[in-house]
Image (cartoon, grey):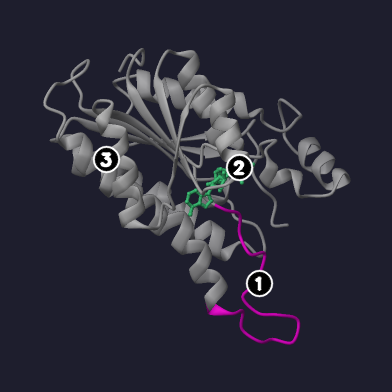
Amino acid sequence: MQLAGRITLVTGGGSGLGLAAATALTDRGARVVIADLPTERAQEAAAAIGARFVAADILDEEQLAVALDAIEEAGPLRAVVHTAGRGGDRLRILDRDGGPAPMASFEEVVRLNLFGTYNVLRLCAARMAGNEELVDGERGAFVLTASVAAFDGQIGQTSYAASKAAVHGITLVAARDLASWAIRVNTIAPGLFDTPMLARLRQDIREGLAESVPFPRRLGAPAEFGSLAVNMIENGYLNGETVRLDGSIRMAPR
Ligand SMILES: NC(=O)c1ccc[n+]([C@@H]2O[C@H](COP(=O)([O-])OP(=O)(O)OC[C@H]3O[C@@H](n4cnc5c(N)ncnc54)[C@H](O)[C@@H]3O)[C@@H](O)[C@H]2O)c1
């Protein structure tokens, strides 16, 4: 789908990979709406790239509905890049004394990364299904965000790996479910990207991570994520696919 003038939604677009996707979309002439938690940082980021900001927690059906109503006042929603999510809890199944990890933490990660993804998918797809006019033969397109942890999760990543493997798992199902509505669904599984999520790590750890990427031997640039997200929307034959974007890294156990 050609993006010029199309209304696109980027969840989690106030930071990191989402902000990079929003920037790439605006560069293509799309009209971008960023949905993120109501922080000044996210609002300023949206304003800086000429995107509109709507405050919404992706887990909250009502907030998303209000956001989607506001978006649709401008026209039909055509594409969604869903990046809102979080890292894992770094808890092993058993602690040092052999005690079980807390359930609440596992639930929290899965709730945001998986339930959040499904909530965005179902509510946005329902809006796209109402698009009477097809653009380049389709009603809309989704880009979801998994992680290489979906395939090679590390020690302490049970909750994160489970949530991201599930995002990969629903990609083909979603593409099949929504095929009759002429809506495509693809997923990016990023490796190690230089975003605020990784900036929280110590510099020597960040450098070690960059060194572990076979080629190119560096962290991914968020703009590289943005460029693939744009291509996934523009390339009408790509559907039901998860693409690793990772410099060919395969994560070691730790
Ligand atoms: N950075 C990496 O190396 C990397 C690697 C693999 C996967 N990912 C995935 O990419 C996505 C984006 O990561 P990032 O590095 O850009 O992180 P980030 O922390 O920079 O951005 C995440 C954004 O999501 C928003 N968000 C969180 N909870 C939300 C909610 N309930 N409702 C609405 N917005 C919410 C945050 O406010 C933030 O703006 C995540 O799903 C993450 O798991 C990142």
Amino acid type, label 1: Arg
Whether the residues at callouts 2 and 1 have beta carbons within 8 Å, the answer is: no
Residue 91 part of the magenta-drawn span: yes
Q: Hey, which residue is sitting farthest right in the picture?
A: 204
Label 3 C-beta lies within 8 Å of the nearest ligand 1 atom: no
Q: Residue at x 78, y 49 (%)?
A: 201
Give the residue pinned by disc 1: 92
Identified at 67% across, 46% down, the residue is 197
Q: Residue 171: where, in percent of width, then height?
A: 34, 44
Q: Main secondary structure of the magenta part?
A: loop
Q: SS for tag 3?
A: helix
* Residue 250 visible somewhere in the drawing: yes
Q: Which disc is residue 65 wearing?
A: none
Residue 245 in view, yes or no: no
Residue occupied by mark 3: 69
Identify the residue shown where x is 39% and y is 59%. 115
Query: Against 223, is 91 above or below?
Result: below
Q: Is residue 174 magenta?
A: no
Left or right: 29 in relation to 93: left
